[in-house]
Image (tube, rainbow, N blue to C red):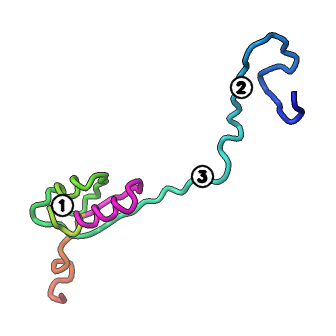
Amino acid sequence: MPDNITFKDIPIGQRVPGAYLEIDPSRAVRGLPQIAHKMLVISQRLSTGIIAEGLPVRITRKEDGINYFGRGSMLAQMIAASLEVNPYNDCGFVRSEPLYRILGNRA
């Protein structure tokens, strides 16, 4: 056997013919763990949306965005765009109050 291969479970003096397999997972994971990227989108919905105000919702399909926040709403469009760019990101979406309610007479 070559000198650079070492086995933990298969003895070097094994003389019985056959195929022996050993898996050593000690070097399988190298480097730093991946960073979990998360995104929170806060925007407005249409009156046809069914999600309550201020309630964070995790969405993984464009159709859910349309059902929850209304077809053509800002949030539905943002959901479609974010899922198109990165479908594997952990995204949360929150419906906020309309801007005129937040600013009052200052708008």
Q: Where is residue 77 drawn, in percent x and y?
A: 24, 66
Residue that carries the numbered disc 2 in the rendered image:
22
The three-letter amino acid code for the residue at tag 1 is: Phe
Q: CA distance from mark 2 to mark 1?
A: 54 Å
Q: Kindly indicate the quadrant of the structure image that contains residue 101.
A: bottom left
Q: Give the mark nearest the N terminus, 3 or 1.
A: 3
Q: Where is residue 87 drawn, in percent x and y?
A: 37, 55
Q: CA distance from mark 3 to mark 2?
A: 26 Å
Q: Kindly indicate the quadrant of the structure image that contains residue 71.
A: bottom left
Q: Which residues lie in the magenta part?
A: 76-94
Mark 3 is surrounded, within 10 Å at the Cα level, by few (under 14), some (14 to 19) or many (20 or more) other residues, namely few
Q: Secondary structure at mark 1?
A: helix
Q: Are marks 3 and 1 in contact (CB under 8 Å)?
A: no
Q: Where is residue 17 drawn, in percent x and y?
A: 78, 11
Task: Identify the residue shown where x is 79% and y is 21%.
Answer: 10
Task: Identify the residue shown where x is 28% and y is 61%.
Answer: 80
Q: What numbered label is drawn on residue 69?
A: 1
Query: Measured along the vertical axis of the image, is residue 6 above or below residue 15?
Result: below
Q: Is residue 56 left or right of residue 22?
A: left
Q: Give the mark nearest the N terminus, 3 or 2.
A: 2
Residue that carries the numbered disc 3 in the rendered image:
33
